[in-house]
Amino acid sequence: MDRQSFIKATGIGFGASMIPGIGLGSTKETSPTETFSEDDLWVLGHKITLYKDSSGDFDLAIGVTPPNVPGPPPHYHETFDELFLVLEGKMEFMVGKKTIKASPGDMVDLPMETVHTFGNDGDKPCKWLNIHSPKGFSAFFEAFGVKATETDALKKSVAEKVIGQVMQQASQFDMIIME
């Protein structure tokens, strides 16, 4: 998938000024009271906190998606099952040819080889729990994430350079982007 197709499929790459709360040249991405830990990352416009101390064979992350932020382009995983549990707000999922509107408490189960994507088309942030099994997909978040403690981290996470890297390398992390 080329850059233009990626942008068309996801809406990512439209410029950080289009993301609510982010203006060009702005260094504030969140409310002044929000703090980040060293484990928080911004990945393609989503704040991701990885939990690495699991004794089980799964990766666990908590994500926060700002309002009107799309997810990655439609993709599937050949070796990972994936699960989302919506904790706050509302999310929209594309699973195969179906659209699922999910609210707090709703779970979206994505067996391997299921084409999917997600996003927040609402006006409030949404928070979600994400599990990949077996372990291994957290390497994607670590490879493409920008530490949330960096200045302009959210803006950097949707920079053309990062999008280009994702397009070129996603399959190395078992994220097979649909053309």
Image (cartoon, helix red, strand yellow):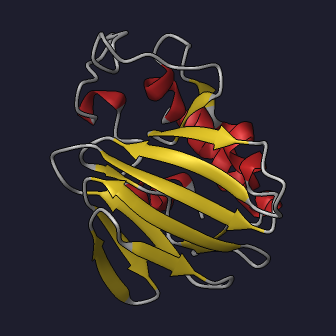
Question: Is residue 111 shown above or below 107?
Answer: below
Above or below, 123 against 112 in this view is above
155, above or below 145, in the image: above
Q: Residue at x 25, y 19 (%)?
A: 23
Question: Image check: 169 left or right of 73?
Answer: right
Quadrant hosting residue 85: bottom left
Image mark count: 0
In the rendered image, residue 99, in percent from the top left (x then y), is placed at 31, 82
Residue depicted at x 51% and y 25%: 156
From the top left corner, tell me how far across and down residue 11 is, in percent: 36, 52
Viewer can see residue 19: yes
Name the image quarter holding the C terminus: bottom right
Q: Is residue 101 left or right of residue 114?
A: left
- The residue furthest front is 55
In this rendering, position of residue 45 left or right of residue 177: left
Q: Front-most of 104 and 1? A: 104
- Quadrant containing the N terminus is bottom right
Q: Is residue 116 left or right of residue 172?
A: left
